[in-house]
Image (spheres, rainbow, N blue to C red):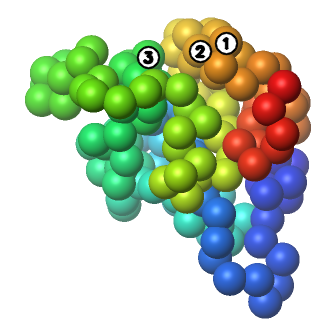
Amino acid sequence: AWAAAVARPPGESLGDAVLDLPTDAGPTMATSRYLFWQAFHGRPIPYGPDARASTSALVNDPAFRALAALCRRRADEDRRLALWSPGPGGTDPRRLRARGIRWIVLHPDLDPEAAPRLRAALEANLGPGRAVGDALLWDLAAPER
């Protein structure tokens, strides 16, 4: 249901990207389903074939790092990525719009432990997300509330 809400109309260029969260789901490969969903909605996603924070084109962006820090991942990746330090620059998720992200989609079922932290951070900056099926959707191109 949520993927239809962001689906690329036939003939439209790739354009705006979708950031699926959580970036990681503990030691599992659950976030790999983002690649399947990407094939359905036809929009770019900022993840490599392994679909986790470490493969994201946004891994050095402070706004992405702040969100990724709220997710669970393998301990070795956590140490290597040092996400507890977002780096210079703002951590407001709206900054991701300048990086080509239009939609942020939170999938609470992928990591019920991280989902409340991610939702609170997103709502603090963007207001409530729109419930679409089993996901919450934020449109970064929508007027600020």
What x and y, as percent, mark residue 102? 67, 52
Query: Disc 1 residue type?
Result: Ala
CB contact under 8 Å: marks 1 and 2:
yes
Residue 70, label in figure: 3
Q: Kindly state the secondary structure of the residue where label 2 is placed.
A: helix
Disc 1 to disc 2, how far (Cα)?
A: 5 Å
State how many labels appear. 3
- Residue that mark 1 sits on: 124
Q: Residues within 10 Å of mark 3 (few under 14, many from 20)?
A: many
**Residue 39 makes an appearance in the image:** yes
- Which residue is more in the foreground, 100 or 3? 100
CB contact under 8 Å: marks 3 and 2:
yes
In-image side of 98 versus 4 (left or right): left
Q: Kindly state the secondary structure of the residue where label 1 is placed.
A: helix
Query: Disc 3 residue type?
Result: Leu
Q: Which quarter of the figure is the C terminus placed in?
A: top right
